[in-house]
Image (cartoon, grey):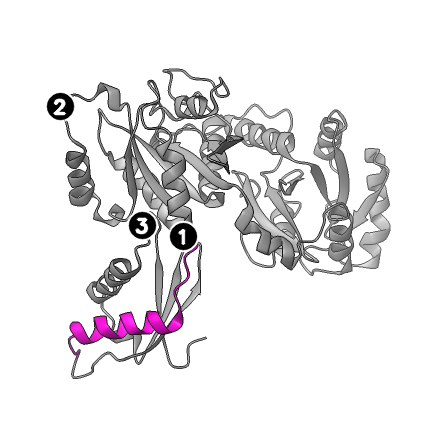
Amino acid sequence: MNEKKIAIVGRPNVGKSTLVNRIAGRRLSIVDDMPNITRDRIYVDATWQDKNFILIDTGGIVEGNEDEFVKNINAQVDLAIDEADLILFIVDAKSGLNPYDYDIANKLRQIKKEVLLVVNKVDSKAQADLASEFWALGFDDMHLLSALHGDGGVGDLLDIITKDIQPETVEELEDDIEKPIKIAIVGKPNAGKSSILNNLLKKQRAIVSNVSGTTRDSIDEEVVFEDKVYRIVDTAGIRKKSKVDYGVEMFAVDRAIRAIRECDVALLVIDSEEGLSDQDKKIASICEEAGCGLILAFNKWDLVKNVQTHKYEQEVESEAPFLNYAEKIYISAKTGQRLDNIFRVAQMVQEQRAKRISTGLLNKVISEAYNLNPPSSIKGKTLRVYYSTQAKNNPPTFVIFINNKDLIQDHYKRYISKKLRENFGFKGTPIVVSYRQKGDK
């Protein structure tokens, strides 16, 4: 089930981002007295009373302004409103009712979605009394609060917006193992992502075109292969940041990156005729940072003549050694060649992401690696490894306790990670290894 999305809208400088940060419990959106600080939509995962939802922070709406900058912000707000299940309309009690508030109220009344009027910056009883002027906006109810000071009004608002959300239970968390494997199809524009989706689904689900950037929104569908369920997510092509136009394309890229962060396995589609590009490497870096599994899918294999797969493996090894862990497949969306391997390899990669190593075996491997190749001393001091444990999986994450973090060098970190892979595999998944010394939390 998709999580409830709540868009926070209003004119500039009414405290939208402050409210987002208050609800999230951490500073995520930039807060400043200068209007239009928030330009892009910011997605924030939030929880209240074990109920999960997504906040969408937006830029300030200024209706009737033909400035290109303002028009782009308004366009992005429209997209946020379009995908939201609930809209929080924020107004400012300190500055009072504003003509822009009327414009926004008229705009929101035209949509067929629930809108809650929230009067922010109510820091005193006098301001609460003055807030009655906002009844003129024509909404049935309004909610008074101070996002900056986090008064009881914030909690009351959260009770209202989460009333129809079921709290997540321990049993539901355990059931995650049985959920469909989520595969995000990502890559540069025109690499063949939508064609792959259409072929996998055996129907025309996404628009296929030679024009770069045809896919704007992320598209997802479930498909069953060999009695296992997979959720396939097609995304917009991700171009170099300098070439992305502010507006619809930027929003589409934002959604694509979010899809990467939410997926189990990313299928990075690479044009076999072009080979591995710098942009492919950047997208792969986003996938690695997100902690999802990674499959490099060399597409358009039917157009490659007299070239063996070994050439591409060497290219990855020489130009992007950080991607050596990624699984590689060679496919053709046009002919359907080896497309079934996407499911089989994704299943294997997800199993690797979920792998857990016993503490005893892990410590044995780390100890053997240390004794086989002891680190060199630094200024007469020698690195000591005390204990190792796996903190979590998805992706596999390890903590190694040592005597002094200043003594662990980057090349030795790479050596330890290499030994972990040699002993436990972890094919297709990034691994995270952190080092802690006595006294660290």
Residue sitting nearer the eye, 237 or 362? 362
357 within the magenta span: yes
Is there a contact, CB below 8 Å, between mark 2 and mark 1? Answer: no
Residue 73 falls in image quadrant = top right
The residue shown at (62%, 52%) is 46
Amino acid beneath label 3: Lys
Residue sitting nearer the eye, 376 or 132? 376
Whole-angstrom CA distance, mark 2 to mark 1, is 35 Å
Residue 395 falls in image quadrant = bottom left
Amino acid beneath label 2: Asn
Local SS, label 1: helix
Give the image location of residue 230, x and y in percent.
49, 37
Residue indicated by mark 3: 427
Judge from the rendering whether residue 288 lies leftward or rightward of residue 301; answer left or right. Answer: right
Mark 2 vs 1, N-terminal side? 2
The residue shown at (73%, 35%) is 101
Local SS, label 3: loop
> In the picture, which quadrant includes the N terminus?
top right
The residue shown at (19%, 76%) is 371
Mark 2 vs 3, N-terminal side? 2
Mark 3 vs 1, N-terminal side? 1
Which residues are the magenta region? 354-378
Q: Is residue 62 above or below residue 17?
A: above
Whole-angstrom CA distance, mark 3 to mark 1, is 8 Å
Q: Residues within 10 Å of mark 3 (few under 14, many from 20)?
A: many
